[in-house]
Amino acid sequence: MLRFVPFQDTAAVARFEIALPKLAAAMHLILPDGRVYPGADAMPRLLELFPGKRWLAPLFSVPGVLPLARRIYAWIAIRRHCLVRGLEGR
């Protein structure tokens, strides 16, 4: 089961022991065993959780795909407020 916790919920995120600047910069997937995957690194793990999308997860092990995904994620994360604002005007 996935649960979304906004990083602004300081009481809820305090137990994860991840610095606030890191939480503000990227989403983090925290697995029940304690492993933490930030940003694009979470994508293959998330895809593995959805039966219809599991076949996409191995694509991230192709050389160059994960580094490219990290760059794309960072580009979107930096501009996310501008991108959302641009969609609201439609």
Image (cartoon, rainbow, N blue to C red):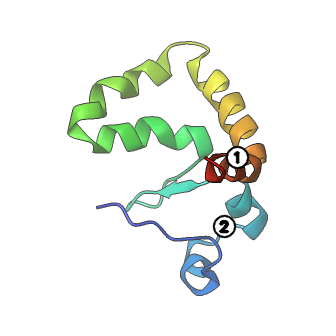
**Secondary-structure class at tag 2:** loop
Residue occupied by mark 2: 18
In the rendered structure, the answer to whether residue 50 lies left or right of residue 73 reads left
Q: Residue 1 in the image: x percent, y percent? A: 28, 61
Question: Is 76 or 57 nearer to us in this picture?
Answer: 76
Could you classify mark 2 by the number of other residues whose Cα lies within 10 Å: few (under 14), some (14-19), or many (20 or more)?
A: few
Question: Is 87 or 10 nearer to us in this picture?
Answer: 87
Which mark, by number, is residue 66? Answer: none
From what the image shows, is residue 63 above or below residue 33? above
Q: Residue at x 67, y 30 (%)?
A: 72
Q: Residue at x 27, y 42 (%)?
A: 50
Query: Extreme top residue here?
Result: 63
Which mark, by number, is residue 86? Answer: 1
Residue type, mark 2 in image: Ile
The answer to whether mark 2 and mark 1 are in CB contact below 8 A is: no
Question: Is 78 or 22 nearer to us in this picture?
Answer: 78
Could you classify mark 1 by the number of other residues whose Cα lies within 10 Å: few (under 14), some (14-19), or many (20 or more)?
A: few
Q: Residue 51 in the image: x percent, y percent? A: 21, 38
Q: Residue at x 32, y 38 (%)?
A: 48
In the rendered structure, the answer to whether residue 89 lies left or right of residue 33 reads right
From what the image shows, is residue 56 above or below residue 73? above
Q: Quadrant of residue 56?
A: top left
Q: Quadrant of residue 15?
A: bottom right
